């Protein structure tokens, strides 16, 4: 068991090294000189050369890469070119809104999609099933930012029920925090609901054809208990797997949703960093998100042990 | 001769005599065209392509023409349009104008060209590159580990983030946008092709072909590709739909194609600042975007149901 845990954690190392390589070379191969951007229009070529030397941009690429990875290993993500703060600090400042948005979205999506998927599987081919499948194609197709604006238009402008934009920190009162997160989370959760509901439906429908379902029914167990204790429980692994894979969608969606709803999180930091070509900041953010993604999928793998006692590593 | 008879045994259980290849192809085409989803999605898509192709004749004017004096007109207004060259003419603004006086209907219709071009180009590029990677990994044992680890790494980077960074770093042109959106899609295609190669390689008829000293390219063309083509077409439609969405997101965030270019994302980004007064500037192009992506997705579902019965059975 412990051996498996170690092996599984070690297996993420090559993935992370590849990610670091891709990110590093993508940024270094890009045209344009960050030193020139830092110096601005006022500086001359001498200033630019000096800044380049200070940043270590004159060294060979493998040396720059080795130095960068060495710093990463010490938890040093580097320093932003323009904001005069370390990348770690900037990410830490912006993390709360993003985590709040992602967490509320995730909870919302699971609470909606799993029961819907189970019900659709229960009445396989019925009206709810067909409606859900139709909705899921729709959910994959309507972009979060269009849904976001539609929600703002309806709930904030037309009916004036919820705030239009912005973010309230959770320590300033959770009511305001939640009120500001309802619309963005709903917009962001649509695609996630579509994804999870689809997989839940398929997995539960497959489980419901098994012999143990017939046995359970023959024993006289209530249909709800058959559906949840025997159907859903045996469908748990594909469901948690797709939740893990869907985190990539969530991360991409966060960037867009934060822009629509003016939430000062990591998504906005990403757009700002990209627009100002802030190399270390872009590197740090992409790396950060990738580590989160790999880590969450590691947790998903480990959760298999919990959901299926037959799995013993 | 021997080679040919071996290859057909894959398609059907050889109890009945197998009809000639072109007849089978024709009946497959008929099955596909009879599918409701293919008809609906494909039909809407054909309409959209026709709209994009016929853009100059659909009551449009130059989508980049600016006239500050006719800015922020409401949809359905008949007004005088003054071009920068000095001449003016009556124009019916079906969807109104943006703050610079550009005709939103014209921008939307011409925007369809950009979306469809990028969607199709990304799908083709991602399929080609993914196929190359998948074939290399499946064929050349020594490269397998290296390529698949590279693909794992690429998959761990959130696609939109990757595309945003690439476009911002290499500049917002149509070509860079296509490449930037295609790269994150490569791993999934590569995995698909690799798995087909690995499965087919173990089939007795391929082993027989290898034993008969059939050259590698012939095995590739006669056995591997025909087996990969259906899942690849299906995957291609989903890549196309995703690419149209991501392009719109890039433009919308201001990190995509140049802002004066008529794209759906750009129209929506321009309308953002005045969303309170003129919500239709954001919502109407959004409807076009959603309908287009929906049509491609529905077409993909229909193709999956008809081309790949195994997959559709699993989905219910």
Image (cartoon, coloured by chain):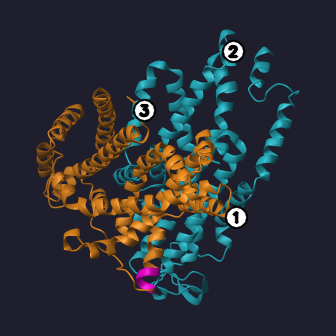
Chain colours: A orange, B cyan
Q: Is residue A274 one of those drawn in magenta?
A: no
Instruction: Return the mark for residue A32.
Output: none
Q: In this view of the protein, can residue B99 be seen by the observer? A: no
In contact (CB < 8 Å): disc 3 and disc 2: no
Q: Earlier in the sequence, mark 2 or mark 1?
A: 1
Instruction: Return the mark for residue B209.
Output: 2
Task: Give the Cα separation between the discs numbered 1 and 3.
Answer: 51 Å
Task: Give the Cα separation between the discs numbered 2 and 1.
Answer: 46 Å
Element type at mark 1: helix
A305 relative to B92, above or below: above
Chain hosting mark 2: B
Q: Position of residue A248 (x, y in %)?
A: 40, 50
Q: Is residue A64 left or right of residue A310?
A: left
Q: Position of residue A87 (x, y in %)?
A: 18, 52
In the image, what residue occupies the spot 41% across and 75% down? B272
- The residue that mark 1 highlights is B47
For marks 3 and 2, give the one nearer the viewer: 3
In the image, what residue occupies the spot 29% across and 59% down? A99
Q: Position of residue B107 (x, y in %)?
A: 54, 72
B168 relative to A29, above or below: below
- The residue that mark 3 highlights is A311
Q: Main secondary structure of the magenta part?
A: helix
Task: Give the Cα separation between the discs numbered 3 and 2.
Answer: 40 Å
Element type at mark 2: helix
Please provide the residue range marked out in magenta.
A154-158
Chain hosting mark 3: A
Q: Is residue A157 one of those drawn in magenta?
A: yes
**Both marks 2 and 1 on one chain:** yes
Q: In this view of the protein, can residue B95 be seen by the observer? A: yes
Q: Residue furthest front?
A: A219
């Amino acid at each position: 068991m412990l051996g498996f845990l170690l092996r599984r954690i070690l297996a993420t190392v090559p993935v992370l090294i590849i990610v670091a390589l891709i990110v590093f070379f993508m940024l270094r191969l890009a045209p344009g000189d960050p030193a020139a951007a830092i110096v601005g229009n006022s500086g001359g070529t001498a200033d630019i050369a000096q800044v380049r030397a200070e940043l270590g941009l004159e060294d060979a690429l493998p040396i720059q890469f080795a130095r960068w990875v060495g710093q990463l290993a010490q938890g040093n993500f580097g320093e932003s070119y323009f904001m005069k703060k370390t990348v770690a600090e900037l990410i830490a400042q912006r993390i709360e809104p993003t985590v709040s948005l992602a967490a509320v979205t995730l909870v919302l999506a699971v609470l909606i999609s799993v029961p819907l998927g189970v019900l659709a599987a229960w009445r396989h081919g019925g009206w709810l099933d067909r409606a859900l499948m139709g909705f899921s194609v729709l959910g994959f197709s309507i972009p979060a930012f269009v849904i976001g604006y539609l929600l703002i238009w309806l709930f904030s402008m037309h009916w004036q029920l919820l705030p239009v934009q912005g973010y309230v920190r959770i320590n300033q009162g959770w009511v305001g925090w939640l009120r500001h997160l309802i619309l963005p989370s709903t917009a962001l959760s649509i695609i996630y609901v579509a994804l999870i509901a689809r997989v839940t439906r398929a997995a539960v429908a497959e489980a419901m054809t098994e012999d143990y379902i017939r046995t359970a029914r023959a024993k006289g167990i209530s249909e709800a208990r058959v559906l949840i204790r025997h159907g859903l429980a045996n469908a748990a692994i594909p469901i948690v797997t797709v939740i893990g894979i869907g985190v990539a969608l969530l991360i991409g969606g966060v960037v867009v949703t934060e822009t629509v709803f003016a939430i000062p999180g990591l998504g906005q930091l990403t757009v700002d960093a990209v627009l100002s070509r802030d190399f270390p900041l872009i590197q740090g953010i992409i790396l950060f998100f990738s580590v989160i993604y790999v880590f969450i999928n590691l947790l998903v793998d480990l959760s298999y042990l919990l959901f299926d006692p037959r799995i013993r590593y | 001769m021997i080679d040919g008879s071996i290859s057909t045994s894959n398609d059907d259980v050889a109890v009945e005599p197998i009809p000639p290849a072109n007849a089978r192809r024709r009946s497959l085409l008929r099955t596909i065209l009879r599918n409701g989803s293919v008809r609906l999605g494909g039909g809407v898509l054909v309409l959209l392509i026709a709209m994009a192709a016929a853009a100059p004749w659909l009551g449009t004017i130059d989508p980049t023409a600016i006239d500050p004096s006719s800015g922020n007109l409401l949809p359905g207004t008949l007004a005088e349009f003054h071009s920068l060259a000095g001449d003016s003419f009556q124009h019916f603004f079906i969807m109104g104008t943006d703050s610079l006086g550009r005709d939103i209907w014209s921008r939307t219709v011409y925007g369809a060209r950009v979306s469809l071009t990028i969607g199709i180009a990304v799908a083709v590029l991602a399929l080609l590159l993914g196929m190359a990677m998948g074939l290399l990994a499946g064929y050349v044992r020594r490269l397998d580990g290296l390529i698949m680890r590279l693909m794992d790494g690429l998959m761990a980077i959130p696609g939109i983030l990757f595309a945003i960074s690439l476009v911002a770093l290499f500049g917002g042109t149509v070509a860079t946008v296509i490449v930037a959106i295609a790269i994150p899609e490569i791993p999934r295609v590569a995995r698909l092709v690799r798995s087909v190669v690995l499965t087919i390689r173990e089939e007795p008829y391929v082993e027989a072909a290898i034993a008969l000293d059939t050259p590698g390219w012939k095995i590739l063309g006669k056995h591997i590709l025909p087996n990969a083509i259906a899942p690849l077409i299906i995957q291609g439609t989903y890549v196309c739909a995703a690419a149209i969405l991501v392009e719109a997101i890039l433009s919308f965030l201001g990190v995509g194609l140049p802002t004066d270019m008529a794209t759906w994302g750009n129209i929506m980004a321009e309308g953002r600042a005045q969303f309170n007064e003129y919500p239709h500037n954001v919502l109407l192009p959004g409807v076009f975007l959603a309908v287009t992506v929906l049509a491609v997705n529905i077409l993909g579902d229909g193709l999956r149901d008809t081309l790949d019965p195994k997959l559709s059975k699993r989905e219910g």
